[in-house]
Image (cartoon, rainbow, N blue to C red):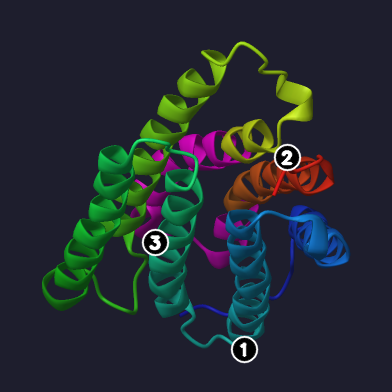
């Protein structure tokens, strides 16, 4: 793996936004619903893994295997969050069945298709497609509620964050291993686009932590 010698400014902004959203989540922890605590836990773990990833990248050590782990953890955490808002037991079970099915696909991809020395382009793209679809479904479901007020509903902020983040990831992650053939400085500049989107998503997650949440 090529060594990164310069960190784009967008990466600093993205990292700072991650720290802020986790700090606010911890501050508001007692006021959060159980599923939002799961989301906070993932965001905190993701922040730690990203720090490790950056440390390895700056030393030219392969860090791509970390993305494989993050993909599974993120999909599992977000499905648990979304399924908690489904009032019908059968559909709740269906969403959790999807998570179990994704784990099987993810594991098979590790064994037969995806190398730990490359991006998990198949698994991450599939994860994003499923999460975008799930977000659209739940946004539609919320819109059917007579008392739904987007700016006051923590669920809306979470769904908006997932939709914004993962709708932009699909193509980028699908082509991630092709992008790796370019010089690392050019790759870092290209990845700045995703860091900007991640910053926006963190702002939306922050909105969800600040909203009043009925227990």
Give x and y (percent) for residue 159. 57, 36
Say whether residue 165 is magenta. Answer: yes
Identify the mark nearer the N-term, 1 or 2: 1
User: Mark 3 and 2 residues: CB-CB less than 8 Å, in contact?
Assistant: no
Q: In what element is the residue under mark 1?
A: loop
Residue shown at 63% from the left, 44% from the top: 193
Q: Label 2: which residue?
A: 204
What's the mark number on residue 59?
A: 1
**Mark 3 to mark 1: distance in Å?**
19 Å
CA separation, marks 1 and 2? 33 Å
Which residue shows up at 82% across the image and 67% down it? 26
Mark 3 Cα shell of 10 Å, populated few (<14), some (14-19), many (≥20)? few
Q: Which mark is residue 116?
A: none
Q: Nearer the viewer, residue 106 or 193?
A: 106
Quadrant of the rendered image containing residue 13? bottom right
Residue at 48% across / 60% down in the picture? 77
Residue 179 seen in this snapshot: no
* Residue 155 in the image, given as x and y percentages of width and height: 63, 36
Of labels 3 and 1, earlier in sequence is: 1
Name the element at disc 2: helix
Could you tell me if residue 6 is visible in this image? yes
Q: Is residue 138 left or right of residue 107?
A: right
Say if the magenta span includes residue 209.
no
Up the image or down, 165 lies above or below 21; here it is above
Q: Answer few, some or many: residues within 10 Å of disc 2's Cα (few below 14, many 20 plus, some between 14 and 19).
A: many
Give the residues in magenta: 161-189
Q: Quadrant of residue 22?
A: bottom right
The picture places residue 65, in percent across and down from the top left corner, at 40, 78
Q: Nearer the viewer, mark 3 or mark 2?
A: 2
Could you say where residue 202 lies in the image, as x and y percent from the top left? Answer: 72, 49
From what the image shows, is residue 200 above or below residue 20? above
Residue labelled with disc 3: 181
């Amino acid at each position: 793996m090529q060594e990164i010698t310069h960190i784009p400014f967008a990466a600093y902004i993205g990292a700072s936004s991650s720290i802020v959203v986790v700090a606010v989540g911890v501050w508001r922890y007692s006021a959060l619903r159980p599923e939002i605590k799961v989301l906070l836990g993932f965001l905190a773990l993701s922040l730690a893994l990203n720090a490790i990833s950056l440390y390895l990248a700056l030393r030219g050590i392969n860090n791509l295997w970390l993305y494989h782990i993050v993909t599974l953890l993120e999909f599992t955490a977000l499905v648990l969050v979304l399924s908690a808002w489904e009032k019908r037991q059968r559909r709740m079970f269906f969403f959790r069945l999807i998570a179990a099915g994704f784990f099987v696909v993810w594991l098979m991809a590790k064994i037969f298709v995806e190398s730990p020395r490359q991006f998990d382009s198949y698994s991450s793209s599939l994860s994003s497609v499923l999460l975008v679809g799930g977000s659209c479904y739940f946004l539609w479901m919320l819109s059917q509620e007579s008392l739904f007020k987007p700016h006051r509903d923590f669920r809306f902020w979470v769904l908006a964050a997932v939709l914004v983040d993962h709708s932009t990831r699909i193509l980028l992650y699908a082509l991630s291993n092709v992008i790796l053939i370019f010089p690392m400085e050019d790759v870092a500049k290209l990845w700045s686009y995703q860091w900007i989107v991640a910053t926006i998503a963190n702002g939306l997650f922050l909105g969800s932590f600040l909203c009043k949440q009925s227990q």
